[in-house]
Amino acid sequence: AQSVTQLGSHVSVSEGALVLLRCNYSSSVPPYLFWYVQYPNQGLQLLLKYTSAATLVKGINGFEAEFKKSETSFHLTKPSAHMSDAAEYFCAVSEAGTASKLTFGTGTRLQVTL
Amino acid sequence: DAGVIQSPRHEVTEMGQEVTLRCKPISGHDYLFWYRQTMMRGLELLIYFNNNVPIDDSGMPEDRFSAKMPNASFSTLKIQPSEPRDSAVYFCASILAGGPDEQFFGPGTRLTVL
């Protein structure tokens, strides 16, 4: 069975500050890991994914995440927050080799303040 | 491509009524997923299809829920009879096996059962 844990249901940062959203996973097989973003009243959009290639993954909108097997983590970061980054962020895991069944975390709502 | 299309975007109905949600996946995609999103339970996978065949329906909450995929370009999720606790946002997503390991989500249907 696979699972992800997102620490912090709400994170608030100032505009221009570092964004760090935490995700830890549990998987009995090599995982694929994903970060999705959901803007209000919209569906989920893929930010980035880890599929067993480079451990540091760069995504859209300046976000990146690092796969750390020893820590079973896949934290999402962005050096400088922008107001437009305010949204809900979901970490997800699937078995390596397939994205056919994703297990999502509970989400982290990012608030960006002036 | 138009992306995943869902209809209706909003549905308000009374308890006991039948509700049908519709989804058109991205052309050529061979997996289709139905999710439910609530504040209490987050994102839950209800059922998914591969080449129009249901593969895993273990997430379907009870017999009141049913899903069909009569062809590669159309799927329905039906609730009969509906109950207030079914109020949620229902998302459809699709993916191409062997493709870029990304599930593409539709905009969702917000269901309110009074």
Image (cartoon, grey):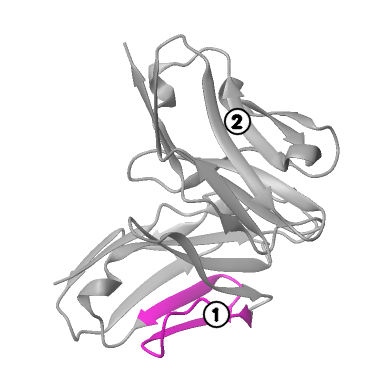
Give the quadrant of residue A52. top right
Tell me if A53 is positioned left or right of A84 in this view. Answer: right
Amino acid identity at mark 1: Met
The amino acid at mark 2 is Leu
Q: Quadrant of the N terminus of chain A?
A: bottom right
As drawn, the label of residue B109 is none
Q: Residue B72 sits in which quadrant? A: bottom right
Residue located 72% across and 43% down the image: A72
10 Å neighbourhood of mark 2: few (<14), some, or many (≥20)? Answer: many
Q: Which residues are magenta?
A: B55-78
In the picture shown, does residue A51 fall above or below A80? below
A26 lies above or below A50: below
**Mark number, residue B69:** 1
Image mark 2: chain:
A
Residue at disc 1, secondary structure: strand
* Residue B75 seen in this snapshot: yes
Q: Is residue A37 left or right of residue B72?
A: left
Which residue is more in the foreground, A15 or B90? A15
Is A101 rendered above or below residue A68?
A: below
Is B95 or A64 nearer to us in this picture? A64
Q: How far apart are labels 1 and 2 at the CA level?
A: 36 Å
Residue where numbered disc 2 is placed: A76
Magenta-colored stretch includes residue A105: no
Counting from the top left corner in percent of width and height, residue A14 is at 38, 13
How many numbered discs, if any? 2
Left or right relative to A112: residue A55? right
Q: Can residue A90 be seen in this snapshot?
A: no
Disc 2 on helix, strand or loop? strand
